[in-house]
């Protein structure tokens, strides 16, 4: 692939055009489960580029959108993917530009990345580049709010497995302009301690026998577990595993012992381990404390996601890293996170190696959300060149 061909594609990426498309998307309301307007708009934006769009309804009026730039057939297929929904616009953020920044709910998370996809596709088309493999542009609904139960990403997993949108690698166009190549596994756990004695006046129950005391013992033991995790296995990109407690519930009256005590929190673990293993460890930690208090104990989990990691030598990592370095003149940073996202679902649901690379992530979900227009432009250039690197280009040397 000649430098001249690369330069023509990079020069064809139009930052102003991308900013206009991003602003259109941001102005379209799209809170999870109410994405109809933005789905219709994004479909129109894809079709305006001359692309056929597979409108895959997840629920009535809420489709995933799949578009394909067909290659010559001799190369691998790359998918550029993102979500169209946003969290609620709690403070009615205005949509406006100020210098290099575009403001409004969804600018960072993640309509900027979705607009950058369009800019990359437009540049490839206008310069007449024919990829050897296919390039897929896909948008899902149902990512943000738990009420959707990840219905859009899971529908995409089903469609990958069925061959409707088969691909070899996925780049999620979200996050910082670094290669996010791993995430820890995550679960929301609930520990329930139940007393067979039921509620009783605290005056007649020794404090040493009050179920709440054993909640204190349990919290102390969880603290010691975190200390052990901090001193134990540490991932070079994401650090030590974590356990956190966010909710403690016990009792219904100030001078009655509680019938049930509950602790709810999150547990995050490194690649190479599974949710069931981590849950069993937590149960083993709880059982002796419950037995000491004569309590019945259950430990349950929900929203569990297994960890993923895509190696530094994977072809998609190399393709995006080389594109980033060419566009920015800086080596790409490989990062990992404790938080989970759709990559955890895609990797474990379909077996397709996945990474993230986005225009920015610093103001995601913030009261004042914004994105740099220049960073959107840069990301689009990276996506176009990464597609050329990964899929190959017809007629290249």
Image (cartoon, helix red, strand yellow):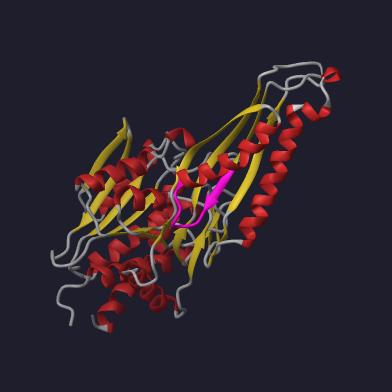
Q: Is residue 289 above or below residue 362?
A: above
Q: 246 or 2: nearer the eye?
A: 246
Residue 245 image position (x, y, % from top left): 65, 42
Q: Residue at x 44, y 80 (%)?
A: 329
Q: Is residue 125 above or below residue 367?
A: below
Q: Residue at x 57, y 41 (%)?
A: 284
Point out the residue furthest to the right here.
203
Residue 151 image position (x, y, % from top left): 37, 37
Q: 189 or 49: nearer the eye?
A: 189
Quarter of the image that includes the N terminus? bottom left
Residue 119 image position (x, y, % from top left): 34, 62
Seen in the image, is 1 located left or right of residue 285? left
Q: 386 or 161: nearer the eye?
A: 161
The stretch of residues the image draws in magenta is 266-275
In terms of image quadrants, where is residue 382? bottom left
In terms of image quadrants, where is residue 296? top right
Q: Residue at x 40, y 48 (%)?
A: 83
Q: 364 or 160: nearer the eye?
A: 160
Is residue 367 in view? no
Residue 274 included in the magenta stretch of the image: yes
Q: Is residue 154 above or below residue 259?
A: below
Seen in the image, is 229 located left or right of residue 7? right
Seen in the image, is 141 located left or right of residue 108? left
Is residue 297 in view? yes
Q: Is residue 298 above or below residue 166?
A: above
Quarter of the image that includes the C terminus? bottom left
Residue 293 included in the magenta stretch of the image: no
Seen in the image, is 126 located left or right of residue 264? left
Residue 5 image position (x, y, % from top left): 25, 79
Q: Residue at x 69, y 45 (%)?
A: 221
């Amino acid at each position: 692939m000649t430098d001249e061909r690369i330069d023509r594609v990079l020069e064809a990426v139009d930052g102003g055009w991308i900013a206009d498309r991003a602003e259109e998307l941001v102005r379209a309301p799209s809170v999870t489960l109410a994405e109809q307007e933005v789905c219709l708009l994004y479909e129109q934006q894809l079709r305006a580029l001359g692309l056929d769009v597979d409108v895959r309804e997840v629920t009535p009026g809420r489709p995933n959108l799949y578009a394909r730039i067909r290659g010559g057939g001799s190369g691998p297929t790359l998918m550029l993917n993102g979500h169209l929904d946003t969290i609620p616009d709690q403070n009615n953020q205005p949509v406006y530009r100020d210098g290099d920044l575009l403001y409004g709910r969804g600018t960072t998370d993640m309509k900027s990345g979705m607009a950058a996809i369009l800019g990359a596709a437009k540049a490839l088309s206008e310069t007449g580049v024919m990829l050897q493999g296919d390039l897929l542009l896909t948008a899902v609904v149902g990512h943000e709010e738990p009420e959707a139960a990840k219905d859009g990403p899971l529908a995409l997993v089903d469609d990958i497995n069925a061959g409707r949108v088969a691909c070899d690698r996925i780049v999620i166009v979200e996050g910082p302009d670094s290669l996010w190549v791993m995430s820890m596994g995550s679960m929301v756990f609930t520990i329930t301690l139940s007393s067979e004695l039921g509620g009783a006046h605290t005056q007649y129950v020794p404090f040493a026998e009050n179920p709440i005391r054993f909640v204190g013992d349990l919290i102390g033991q969880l603290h010691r577990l975190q200390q052990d995790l901090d001193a134990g296995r540490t991932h070079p990109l994401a650090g030590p595993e974590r356990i956190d407690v966010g909710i403690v519930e016990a009792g219904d009256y100030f001078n009655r012992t509680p019938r049930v005590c509950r602790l709810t929190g999150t547990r995050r673990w490194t690649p190479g381990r599974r949710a069931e293993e981590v849950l069993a460890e937590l149960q083993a930690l709880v059982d002796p404390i419950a037995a000491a208090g004569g309590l019945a104990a259950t430990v349950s989990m929900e929203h569990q996601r297994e960890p993923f990691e895509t190696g530094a030598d994977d072809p998609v990592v190399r393709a995006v890293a080389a594109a980033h370095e060419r566009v920015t003149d800086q080596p790409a940073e490989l990062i990992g996170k404790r938080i989970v996202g759709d990559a955890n679902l895609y990797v474990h649901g379909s077996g397709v190696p996945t990474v993230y690379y986005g225009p920015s992530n610093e103001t995601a979900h913030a009261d004042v959300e914004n994105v740099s227009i220049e960073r959107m432009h840069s990301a689009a250039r990276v996506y176009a060149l990464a597609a050329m690197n990964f899929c190959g280009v017809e007629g290249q040397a």
